[in-house]
Image (tube, rainbow, N blue to C red):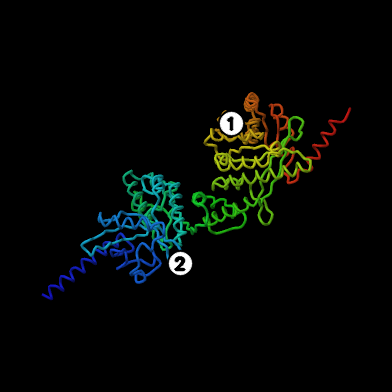
Amino acid sequence: MDKSLKKHASSLRNERNRFAALAFVWGDLLLELDEEFRIVFASGAADGILGLSTEQIDGIRFVDLLSSQFRPLVSEMLNVARRRGRMDNVLVRFTRPDDRVSPPVSLTGYFLPDLGSHFFVALRVTVHSLPHDLLQTIRRDGPTGLLDEESLSRVVTERLMAQRETGQNQKFSLFTLNAFEPLCERMEHVARDEMLSTIGSFFRAHSVAGDTAGRISASQFGMLHSPEVRIGDLEQRIAECARDADPQGKGIIVRTSETDFTAHAMPPGDLARGVLYSIRRFCDKQQHSFTFSRLTGHMPNLVNDTFGAMRDFGQRVDRLEFDAVYQPIVRLPSAEIHHFEVLVRFYREDGELIPTDQLIMFAEQVNMIHRLDLAMMRRTLKWIRQQLNEGIDARVAVNVSGQSLANPDFCRSVIALFERSKECLSQLMIEITETAEITDLEHAAAWLARFRQYGVEICLDDFGTGAANFSYLSALEVDYVKIDGASIRQSLKTQKGRAFLRSLVGLCHQLDIEVVAEMIETDDMRDLVTKAGFDFAQGYLFGKPEKDITSYWRKLRSRRKSKNKPS
């Protein structure tokens, strides 16, 4: 009998151990709670989740370990479980002894009256789980099953936000598969799709959470992964897969670039833009192109370089740590100064000018252009006030990106500035630039109408460089249009081009819009645009951008005095 009991007890222990092992397939920490919710048994990663060992939590009320906002929820779920027998899966967080909050933890469990009326709870860290709204936006490359570029950037951003809480180090690798497109073209459809599916599975299996890999272009793939992943082995497996699938046996060459991903403390929206910008620059064949920090000092890590660039750029902009220069726009044919365009200038520490077009492109791509535009508006209104105090009533046009115009917060901030600076607004103009396309013309038109109510005139810049120009002209109430200099030079080469230019100027005049010719550098160009009917001109022929407009102002006042002298 004793032997039979021992055998039965051993069988029960083996069965219990088997079920515990199966439970660990789902959970990272298993708990048994008594009727008062006190922990009577614990096994698993208690340190990682709770910051306490399994021995330290013995006898503690389970709900007391939770962050305060989750205690009522879990207490109620445990009470409901007494009746229903189980607890549905729910995300919770715990407060650790160092007062840090744990990553999100998925909790589920059962109430078993036959086993002492105890609760059996399983916890699983869900740091890699994705929000439902993000999951609904994910798009995939069909053949590989990998994320597309935009989806990859969003998922990487979510992983980086989780990384802040866990302190995990992660790397991003870009795989370029040389000769991959010709290989795909010479394969049969079925074999090609099978190869793409296999390669996609390689990337997914080695990525964070098994789903942070994407197809960025036809032959480029990106993957966020732990530092432990052996990239060389993965390269070899991909190359072997391609060679085995190639009907000619040639295969491909796999090249990999790797960088650390470290999430700086920046808002999720800015972080997402920075990730997407980094991925695109990472794929750029021209050696990763531009970031703000690269222009002020070389840094070896592209991704962290981008995050650092965004932080540095934002700080300099918010503190107005940049220069402004002023270029005159003159009336034709007299060449009398009508107003100045204010242009931003950033410099390296050694005094060398940072290329402005690249800087603007960077600011737009990482969604920070509205901060620069608002800073320029603040600086310009302050400058106008100073000029008025000195008896100078120079008019100034400040640039605003079409992307900024689509930002309601930016537009409301501009209105607030106008309310505080009404005495300066008669000297202010706004130039809407088209480096970023205006997608919601109705929204933009409404804000421009409000700006014009303050007496601020509006100029549409770079007209002639984009197909959307004529829709802008019909939808937006503007006072001036600036014709792009390159378009003018091209049009003036032929009789047909000159006729088109005259017609364009005539159309603007019919709409009661005056027209500015840009990049006028010679007397011949000035004569040609004057004959074409242009009202104003801008270019080196009339003056380069300068920090100090005093010399221009003296010339303007001397001309005014000479005109007013009795003959």
Q: Secondary structure at mark 1?
A: loop
Residue 231 seen in the current view: no
Q: Secondary structure at mark 2?
A: loop
Residue at (69% x, 54% y) in the render: 351
Q: Position of residue 453 (x, y in %)?
A: 63, 33
In the image, residue 21 sits, relative to residue 129, either above or below, namely below
The kind of residue tagged 2 is Asp
Q: CA distance from mark 1 to mark 2?
A: 57 Å
Q: Position of residue 268 (x, y in %)?
A: 49, 51
Disc 1: CA contacts within 10 A as few (<14), some (14-19) or many (>=20): some
Q: Check the image and name the residue furthest to the left.
A: 1
Looking at marks 1 and 2 on the same chain, the residue that comes earlier in the sequence is marked by: 2
Q: Which residue is the site of mark 2?
A: 98
Q: Which residue is the site of mark 1?
A: 476
Pair 1/2: label in front: 2
The kind of residue tagged 1 is Leu
- Which quarter of the figure is the C terminus placed in? top right
Residue at (35% x, 63% y) in the render: 62
- The answer to whether residue 491 is left or right of residue 134 is right
- The answer to whether residue 486 is left or right of residue 338 is left
Q: Quadrant of residue 331?
A: top right
- The answer to whether residue 411 is left or right of residue 113 is right
Name the one closer to the observer, 450 or 99: 99
Name the one closer to the observer, 142 or 320: 320
- The answer to whether residue 280 is left or right of residue 82 is right
Residue at (85% x, 33% y) in the render: 562
Q: Are marks 1 and 2 in contact (CB under 8 Å)?
A: no
Q: Quadrant of residue 79?
A: bottom left
Q: Position of residue 461 (x, y in %)?
A: 63, 36
Residue 47 seen in the current view: yes
